[in-house]
Amino acid sequence: MADHRPVDSVDPNNLPEYGLLAQYEDVTSLKQACEQVRDAGYSKWDAHSPFPVHGIDAAIGIRPTRLPLLIFGAGATGTTVAVLMQWWMNAFDYPFLISGKPLWSLPANIPVAFELTVLFAALTGIFATLGRNLLPRHHHPLFNNERFARATDDKFFIAIEAKDGRYDATRTRELLESTGAVAVDSVPDDSKINASLPKPLVYFIVASFLAGFVPLGIAARAWFTKSAEPRIHLNPNMDFQQKFKTQSPNPLFADGRSMRPDIDGTVAEGWLRQDDAYYRGLDADANWLVGFPQQVEVSQGTMARGQERFDIYCSPCHGTAGYGDGPVARRAAELKQAKWVTPSSLHQDYLRTQPEGKLFNTISHGIRNMPGYGHAIPESDRWAIVMYIRALQRSQLATTSDVPDSERAKLR
């Protein structure tokens, strides 16, 4: 845009030539003319149509734009900047040690990397498009041609610029006329006269720019000075809500509390738990349940789940085979702790004959040194552990009848 500044020495009556503008009546004539101009070797020209024309790019000879490559490069740059920025902040310049987690892990940084990738690519696409097309540009020499006003209505045009290396006023006109143009006009180049913005628009832009400093000045004054007045509340209904916080005092109630106690007899949704067999291990007569509740599926999948949970919660004390020789028990024995109670072997007779409901209750509420795991292990997993304990107990007293026929021959 620098070469489009007003120049006082330019004579409005003796303007240089911008080029030639040819008008066509239909899109077919336009495409055929484009092919002829393209084949003639011109490079600084363009076609204008009131609507998109299929195949016009090939007829003009427009090469594929490099904009996708530029956008891809900007996106890759955004990804790199985001990853390096987060690594520098979180792993190098100000590292956080949280529960033994690594200082740097890629998955945690993907969202920011994605956002900067999109930001860099989008901004590059916008500004590269504007720059390559010399936009914004409020005036063009073609706007002075009365015929060209119908380029957005029902006419078609080809404009060849005079700065094209093959341009010759006479021969270029003859070429356009030979393509079937209904009119060929010479277009004067008034860009150095009409390129400047209208003065009212200039005044508006300057005033808007200066007005932008007003809120910044107000904010700076509030930041660096003291005031006896309270701060401005743009939304007082949000800043001063007519309510009592949960743990704040409340003079409206006799107990002086804002938080109200639960109404007698109410149960939180999903916590009624009326099924004694599943949630407490009791049968209809309030005795320990023998067997498993109907919600528990006796299957290999449940057994595998029970083994996994047993290894996590039970084996540290009871051992992987259930003999009470886990690493915690062995360590306590080495230290000869006076208050330590040796974990029970799960293969004792009273435990083998103990109802499944009693085992479930022990896991839920604990016994002796063993804490309850009801808060940590869901009911389904507790029943799965009971099922696996039964499998462990049976494995130690198994007979040949318990071995499948396909495996029995291997025992001989």
Image: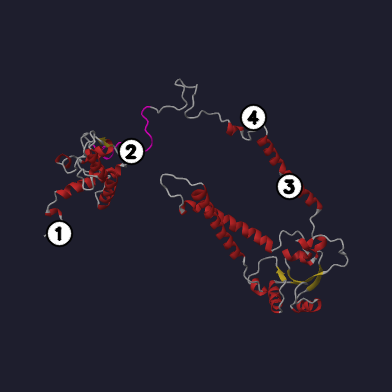
2 or 4: tag closer to the N-terminus: 4
| Relative to 84, 411 lies left or right | left
Q: Which residue is drawn at the image coordinates 71% and 62% (left, top)?
A: 134
Q: In the picture, residue 32 is in which quadrant?
A: bottom right
Name the kind of residue labelled 4 in the image.
Pro
Q: Which residue is mark 1?
A: 405
Of the 4 image quadrants, the one containing the C terminus is bottom left
3 or 4: tag closer to the N-terminus: 3
Name the kind of residue labelled 2 in the image.
His
186 vs 369, nearest the viewer: 369
Please identify the dominant SS of the magenta region. loop
Q: Which residue is mark 2?
A: 375
Name the kind of residue labelled 1 in the image.
Asp
Q: Residue furthest top?
A: 254
Q: Which residue is mark 3?
A: 209
Q: CA distance from mark 2 to mark 4?
A: 49 Å
161 vs 31, nearest the viewer: 161
Q: CA distance from mark 2 to mark 3?
A: 62 Å
2 or 3: tag closer to the N-terminus: 3
Q: Which residue is drawn at the image coordinates 62% and 60% (left, top)?
A: 125
